[in-house]
Image (cartoon, coloured by chain):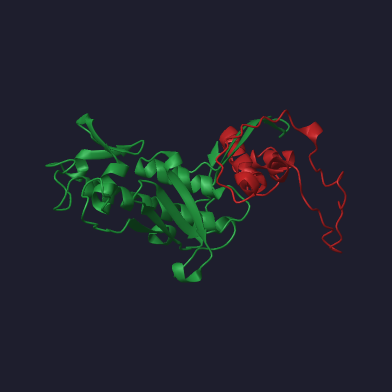
Chain colours: A green, B red
Amino acid sequence: MFTRTEWGARFKYYGKIIVRVNQDGKVLLRYRRLDPGMMTENAYVRAVADEMGMKYEDIYTDTTTDDGNFDVWGPGGSSGTGTNLPAFIDGALKAKQKILELAISAPDYVPYIPFEGKTPEELDIKESIVFEKANPDNKKTVREIVQIWSGIPAYHNFIMHNTDDIVCVGETPGFGWAPYSSHLGRQAQFAEVEVDPDTGEVDVKKAVTVNGRGQGDKS
Amino acid sequence: MGIGWGLNEEVIKDPTTGINLNDNLIDYRWLTMNDIGPIDYHLVEGGLGLGPYGTSGIGECVGASSHGVMMNAIYNAIGKHVDDFPATPQKILKALGKI
């Protein structure tokens, strides 16, 4: 039997985070830390990795303590994970869409378009690689896609385009009532019990706690 | 901890005086290592924690919702909800309509 704790959703908390795809193809997660001491970062990174199709090791975190960076933030403690995690899923989906849109075009000074003639819907990302669904051998790394747009001299020695990194703001959707609404995002619980109907005694056969689970929250 | 909250631990007060009637670890029915089976750990080093060497705590997890999943598992077993912690044998038999 699997259960989820639904704190953030039921109290309609709201959080905002940032998913930034750097010019080196790494993904930075910025957010207000709400759950000191727990392995919440792992859950965030796993969720973003799954949603974006990025490698776990290509994502890193940065906790901000600057109030000016976030105009709203979720509740403190465990409840904060319930608002941040769906916000990260929201941000990851936006960042993935942005990468796929960049993959089908290129700045004027770049001599070729990576996935020319394709649409974002015809592409996907897995293991930090953008590929054509119908022809997986047609592929480019996320880093290559981003660098085409970031002005890396490998593509043009004399022009520095200086396009910003891909920055996507994720928000707790629908104040917790969206399809992937707020749950205590860092853990999952399972239990197997045997109940004696004559005595009412409960025998716990197995109990499993998973920490830092990440994905599985989108339901 | 979560199993204890779900199945055993309960503060019992005298309804007239409010005095705690089980303010010791025997009558409170605190689970000990003798009450549970072997514990397996499977550690995955994420390295993202803010503690030394990227470590972080995990202690709250078992306390946050383990007791809830115990109640769900009991419901799955008997088809009746026990909606009051802890799920003592008496409450389970009451849910089953046997007392």
What percent of the width, then of the height, locates residue B50? 60, 51
Where does the N terminus of chain A fall, quadrant-wise? top right
The residue drawn where x is 17% and y is 40% is A115
The residue drawn where x is 78% and y is 39% is B31
Is A199 drawn above or below residue B69 in the view shown? above
Most foreground residue, A120 or A66: A66
Name the image quarter holding residue A130: top left
Is A10 drawn above or below residue B38 in the view shown? below
Where does the C terminus of chain A fall, quadrant-wise? top left
Most foreground residue, A174 or A26: A26
Instruction: Indicate left or right for A17 with A95 as reference.
Output: right
What percent of the width, then of the height, locates residue A75? 54, 63
What percent of the width, then of the height, locates residue A153? 26, 49
What percent of the width, then of the height, locates residue B27? 86, 45
Instruction: Indicate left or right for A138 with A200 as reference.
Output: left
Most foreground residue, A191 or A87: A87
Most foreground residue, A44 or B34: A44
Q: Is residue A142 visible?
A: yes
Name the image quarter holding residue A77: bottom right
Q: Is residue A181 visible?
A: no
